[in-house]
Image (cartoon, rainbow, N blue to C red):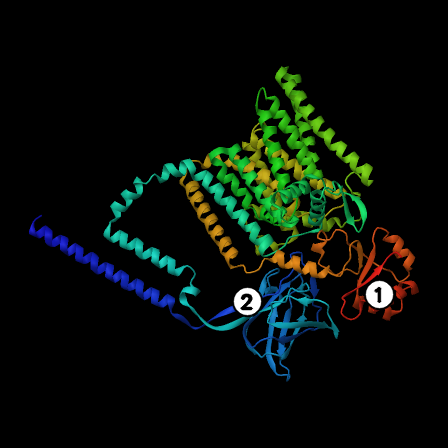
């Protein structure tokens, strides 16, 4: 090395040292700023009441003030009031006047909020600067003008964590429930700029390390080292499976956080499934004590889903609700596994269909659609395999029969698959008539045999239901009066929702506000676009073709059935299985054109990063959750039912409806003024006790409208209950 080269080397070294020191100085300054308390920035604590997942509304009538008395339980400085309101009517374009008075009548707050600025189903923050003192009572008045929005009703115990007691009244009458009202309370703890700018500290650390490496190692050497890493071959070999595992973890953790730790998703159907699962786990079979002592036959829904929940209960030793969530996680894993077996290394992109908003909502609820989708997918794969093979194996027909049977025994509507299969068999017979190929005839008769065997099992099941229950599907499906205009509106809204769900987005507000006619045009345009794509690219004998046929038939048959029978109106729950199959079909048609392009690789990287961020976010919520919502709710149910004996009927029941499976021996009942005690005892012959809230019983007696024999029983019950009991309990016999 010459002297000149040595000087250049020293010069370069000094340059690197100076730049490094400068970089570290900038980093230190950034850390100082990020760790420095923000000016006038204080940490806030959010206090929100718990509201039920199935909403119950409290109406705000136009021109009628809703008065809320707030008794402060601690000294607190409030930075905002939090309101959860729903603007039910599109005509609501007025304001909500919100005012707050202290005990002396001094006006502390007076704000007018446009109703249209309140996002339905989201917490709305009203900024303020209020100081409330312990023990003081404040009067909050909510007065709607030009509209009638709704608050959410808060169940008993839902406001236990609030820093104030709440009493709601309207027209001078105290309300039995509280409303969705919370606060943000300022603390004395200052927040740093690092707290304000999320992830700023780790980003700065990563940036300075990267720049130091770039400075001392060099760009070319870093690129060379990076290229030597077997990253490409590793991703090509394991990337697909790693992404599916990441997706599985993200979905499962989300289910656990959303539907167990932070919420409970139970509908009327869910309660039926859970009730039967408990019965099966106890060895009671299809018969259960579900109606206060009446022996009931489980027929309203098929048996497979509650049987799977019961199996998970016995396997894990958990309660029925948690078992249903664990079962959903297992079913998600099986769905991903089936996709992996079917689509091999392309399975990752098909797995994204499970990030559909509608599918995730299905996972949160205890509903049968998730196992239904698994069995429907298996049936579609078997049907396409048989359809494409010249000489299908006998095992293919067995699997077709088994999966088809499970489709029906999961949801009664699953019988539609044999209608589709029947049409395909007729097509095969027509092909045989034209070409006289023996394999075609064998295939047609084999599919018919599988269908007849599965159909025979299904018909036997329905006939047994009819014998035990009186109705093949448990309840009458005959048509009652329906508002067809509203039904059609719901259909259009549901189809738009399905399109948005596929892309994991809500219906944009600009679309939501369009007229009905324009929404119809959008739906028709989307259907034409999908139809043209299927017509141009889809082949009848392909897997994509079979899935498309099953999906389109599902949509068409279900829509027709709904217009001629009674059930819930159209919404995502009903359409999600068909949307799932249709998405798989469309991806298979489009994907060949995307392979090898940089856009697909970039999308894969983006999807992986997004899934990882979602997983980390869910894990963070898991860590931050102090109390399990379900366990707390179960404690409340135990408290609610504490005074309710076995095999009771509750009159004017106000216990959380989600607990109906929790105590299947309890039934809800009513008493009309003209009913005698003998009539009541005869009506509820399967029950042992009649229970009614003490304050309700007093109100009934004070009205003087009820039969003397009933009044006598209530009077005796009140005497026995005393002042400390919440419920009056009266024996129905003896």
Question: Where is residue 364 shown, x and y percent of the image?
Answer: 61, 50
| Count of number-bearing discs | 2
The vertical placement of 8 against 348, above or below, is: below
Say which residue appears at 71% left-offset and 26% top-offset.
Answer: 452
Separation of disc 2 and disc 1 at Cα? 44 Å
Q: Image height check: is 578 above or below 148?
A: above
User: In the rendered image, which residue does mark 1 sit on?
Assistant: 717
The C terminus: image quadrant:
bottom right
- x, y (%) of residue 50? 62, 62
Q: Position of residue 705 (x, y in %)?
A: 89, 67
Q: Are marks 2 and 1 in contact (CB under 8 Å)?
A: no
* Residue pointed to by mark 2: 46
Between 140 and 161, the one lying in front of the other is 161
- Residue 333 is drawn in which quadrant? top right
Tell me where residue 634 appears, x and y as whole percent: 66, 57
Tell me if 535 is positioned left or right of 238 in this view: right
Residue found 44% across the figure and 44% down from its top:
603
Q: Which residue is painted at 51% across and 72% down in the image?
A: 186
Q: Quadrant of residue 234?
A: top left
Q: Is residue 74 visible?
A: yes
């Amino acid at each position: 090395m010459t002297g000149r080269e040595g000087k250049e080397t020293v010069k370069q070294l000094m340059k690197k040292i100076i730049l490094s020191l400068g970089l570290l100085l900038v980093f230190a300054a950034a850390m100082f700023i990020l760790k420095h308390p923000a000016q006038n920035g204080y940490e806030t604590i959010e206090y929100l009441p718990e509201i039920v997942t199935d909403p119950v509304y409290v109406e705000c009538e136009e021109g009628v003030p809703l008065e809320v008395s707030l008794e402060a339980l601690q000294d607190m400085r409030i930075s905002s009031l939090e309101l959860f309101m729903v603007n039910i009517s599109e005509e609501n374009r007025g304001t909500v006047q919100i005012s707050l008075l202290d005990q002396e009548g001094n006006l502390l707050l007076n704000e007018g909020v446009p109703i249209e600025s309140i996002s339905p189903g989201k917490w709305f923050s009203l900024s303020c600067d209020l100081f409330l003192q312990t023990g003081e009572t404040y009067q909050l008045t909510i007065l709607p003008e030009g509209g009638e929005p709704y608050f959410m009703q808060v169940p008993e115990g839902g406001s236990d964590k609030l820093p104030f007691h709440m009493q709601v009244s309207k027209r001078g009458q105290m309300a039995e429930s509280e409303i969705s009202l919370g606060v943000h309370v300022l603390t004395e703890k200052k927040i740093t700029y690092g707290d304000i700018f999320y992830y700023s500290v780790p980003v700065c650390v990563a940036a300075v390390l990267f720049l130091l490496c770039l400075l001392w190692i060099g760009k070319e050497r870093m690129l060379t080292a990076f290229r030597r890493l077997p990253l490409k071959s590793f991703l090509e070999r394991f990337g697909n499976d790693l992404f599916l595992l990441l997706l599985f973890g993200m979905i499962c953790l989300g289910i656990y956080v959303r539907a167990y730790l932070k919420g409970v998703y139970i509908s009327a159907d869910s309660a039926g499934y859970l009730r039967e699962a408990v019965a099966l786990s106890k060895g009671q079979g299809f018969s259960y004590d579900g109606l206060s002592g009446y022996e009931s036959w489980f027929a309203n829904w098929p048996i497979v889903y509650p049987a799977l929940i019961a199996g998970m209960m016995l396997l894990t030793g958990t309660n029925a609700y948690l078992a249903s969530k664990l079962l959903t996680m297992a079913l998600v894993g099986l769905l991903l596994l089936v996709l992996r077996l079917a689509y091999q290394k392309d399975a990752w992109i098909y797995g994204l269909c499970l990030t559909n908003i509608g599918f995730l909502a299905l996972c949160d609820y205890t509903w049968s659609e998730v196992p239904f989708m698994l069995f429907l997918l298996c049936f579609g794969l078997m049907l396409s395999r048989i359809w494409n093979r010249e000489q299908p194996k006998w095992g293919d027909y067995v699997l077709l029969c088994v999966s088809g049977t499970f489709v029906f025994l999961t949801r009664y509507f699953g019988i539609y698959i044999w209608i589709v299969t029947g049409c395909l068999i007729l097509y095969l017979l027509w092909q045989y008539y034209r070409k006289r190929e023996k394999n075609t005839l064998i295939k047609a008769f084999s599919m018919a045999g599988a269908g007849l065997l599965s159909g025979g099992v299904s018909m036997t099941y329905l006939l047994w239901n009819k014998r035990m229950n009186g109705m093949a599907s448990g309840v009458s499906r005959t048509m009652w009066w329906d508002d067809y205009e509203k039904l059609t509106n719901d259909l259009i809204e549901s189809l738009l929702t399905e399109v948005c769900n596929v892309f994991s987005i809500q219906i944009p507000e600009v679309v939501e506000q369009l007229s009905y006619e324009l929404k119809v045009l959008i739906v028709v345009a989307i259907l034409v676009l999908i139809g043209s794509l299927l017509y141009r690219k889809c082949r009848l004998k392909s897997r994509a073709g079979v899935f498309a046929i099953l999906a389109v038939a599902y949509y068409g048959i279900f829509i027709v059935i709904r217009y001629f029978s009674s059930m819930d109106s159209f919404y995502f729950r009903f359409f999600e299985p068909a949307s799932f199959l249709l998405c798989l079909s469309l991806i298979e048609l489009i994907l060949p054109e995307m392979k090898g392009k940089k856009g697909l690789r970039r999308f894969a990287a983006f999807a992986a990063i997004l899934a990882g961020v979602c997983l980390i976010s869910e894990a963070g919520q898991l860590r931050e959750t102090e109390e399990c919502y379900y366990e707390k709710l179960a404690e409340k149910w135990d408290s609610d039912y504490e005074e309710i004996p076995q095999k009771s009927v509750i009159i004017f029941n106000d216990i959380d409806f989600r607990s109906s499976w929790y105590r299947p021996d309890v039934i809800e009942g009513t008493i009309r003024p003209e009913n005698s005690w003998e009539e009541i005892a005869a009506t509820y012959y399967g029950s042992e006790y009649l229970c009614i809230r003490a304050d309700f019983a007093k109100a009934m007696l004070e009205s003087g409208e009820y039969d003397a024999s009933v009044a006598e029983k209530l009077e005796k019950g009140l005497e026995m209950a005393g002042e400390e009991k919440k419920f009056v309990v009266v024996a129905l016999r003896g």
